[in-house]
Amino acid sequence: MQSMGDALGLAVALVLSGDADLLEIVLLSLRVSLTATAFACIVGLPVGALVAIGRFRGRSAVLIVMNALMGLPPVVVGLLVYLHLSRSGPLGFLGLLYTPTAMIIAQTILIAPIVAALSRQVIEDLHVEYAEQFRSLCLTRTQTVQALLWDARYSLLTVGLAGFGRAVAEVGAVIIVGGNIDHLTRVMTTAIALETSKGDLGLALALGIILLGIALGVNAAVQSVRMAAVRHAYV
Amino acid sequence: MTYAPLADCGEETAILPLAVRDLVLRLGEATILDGINFDLGPTGCTMIMGPNGAGKSLLLKLLHGLIAPNSGRISWGKVRPTRVTSRQALVFQKPVLLRRSVAANIEFVLRARGKDVARRDFLLDHVGLAHKAAQPARLLSGGEAQRLALARALATDPEVLFLDEPTASLDPASVLAIEAIVSDARARGVRIIFVTHDPGQARRLADDVVFLERGRVAEHSSAAEFFPEPQSDAARNYLSGKLLV
């Protein structure tokens, strides 16, 4: 078995070589996970905000379910999406199975609850501070949600980042609905799984290191934006 | 699904004068306000005074509609709104500023109320913050933050402006700046209802004074009568600096 040092060297060599296959896999990983994160934010942020400011019967139960859904098993999500998108499923006519779109759908379902639950907490904390002022200003519910989402934007970046982290590192769902097809649906995690099963642990480790580097890079970028916001008292 | 009550802002009728009758507010077992009665005319500046815990700030929130009384009646003009109306604005003791620039804080209110956003520059200039328009609002000093909160309140074109100890903890220059803005608003016809602990400030601004003690109106009289000859022992002791226990 190759050492971590060998794997790191291989990872650097792979990146420096500008390997077209590797680049394709990395770009597809980013496209799928960033798109899924965007959709999850579009759905999850307003849901989180509405639950944050809402006071309704059964709210505690909703919070419990939202928090529980953060731990959705990826393979279960993958299976459910597979059942819906397979030829005999209700959405089979769309022909989406084993496409990047199916992977995006699965990842969106997986991370939308994470975005909703975490954003609910962030927005609720902010709402405690703003609620009386907003009522005094006669804001509508829509205006309240919009204002809270905007003013919490830098904190919500971290929420989005948590969703992206879960998506880009996820393998169970995308391998079921994507199929790990070379040049079509192969992403970093499924490629790592494949290389590991083939016994090419060095390449798998190298891919893992590249994946880790991407995650670190995205985190660093978001963190720098957040720190700038803190300096300007926007957090 | 129902939500925490939001302001009922559909009332566009002139809302003055104000009549408060038998207003009672209880929080848990404690009776905070106990049978409050007074009338306010359509113009001028009313100072609400009294020792800590007299219920001044809660009275202001009741009048503004942020909280509901346990019993009693608040009648604004010919209507009886149970919630805050768009004809009122409240400046809190500790201003809640949005996590945006100074200018964006004003723009937000103007847009929310469907007003002309071009008024932003006038309002910033009016409160002396034009040079800080692009700065983050939450980095303003206490006095500047309160002036921004005032500008934001004035952006709503209120008929009634409530101020809840807006100059507490501010330096004399900031206090005078706030008072100048409030005086200007009054001169423009905005009805001012101002909570303060500061007798000097009350003397400078008040047309009349509502003095609260232990949740009751101890005295309501014109400023010309109140300061030289307060009628109640509570007000007399307060103005002479004696502690009210």
Image: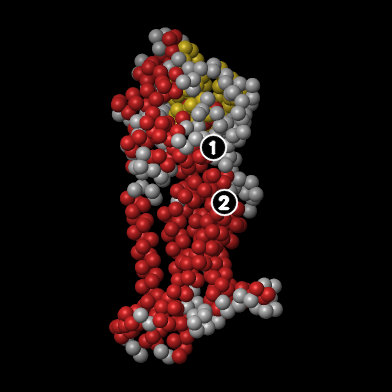
Which residue is at a point 47% across and 53% down the rendered structure image?
Answer: A122
When asked about the image quadrant of residue B20, the answer is: top right
Q: Kindly identify the amino acid type of the residue bearing the numbered disc 1.
A: Gly
Q: Work out whether residue A73 or residue B236 is closer to the camera in this orientation and state it.
A: A73
Read off the residue under disc 1.
B114
Q: Position of residue A88 (x, y in %)?
A: 70, 78
Which residue is at a point 50% across and 15% down the rendered structure image?
Answer: B220
Q: Give the distance between the C-alpha atoms of the residues marked 2 and 1, in whole angstroms.
A: 23 Å
Which residue is at a point 61% across and 23% down the rendered structure image?
Answer: B75
Q: Kindly identify the amino acid type of the residue bearing the numbered disc 2.
A: Leu
Q: Circle 2 marks a residue in which chain?
A: A
Q: Residues within 10 Å of mark 2 (few under 14, many from 20)?
A: many
Q: In the rendered image, is residue A86 in sight?
A: yes
> Can you say which quadrant of the picture contains the N terminus of chain A?
bottom left
Label 2 element class: helix
Q: Position of residue B21 (x, y in %)?
A: 60, 21
Read off the residue under disc 2.
A50
Would you place residue B126 above or below residue A216 in this image? above
Which residue is at a point 55% across and 82% down the rendered structure image?
Answer: A179
Q: Work out whether residue A157 or residue B70 is closer to the camera in this orientation and state it.
A: A157
Q: Position of residue A29 (x, y in %)?
A: 46, 74
Label 1 element class: loop
Q: Circle 1 marks a residue in which chain?
A: B
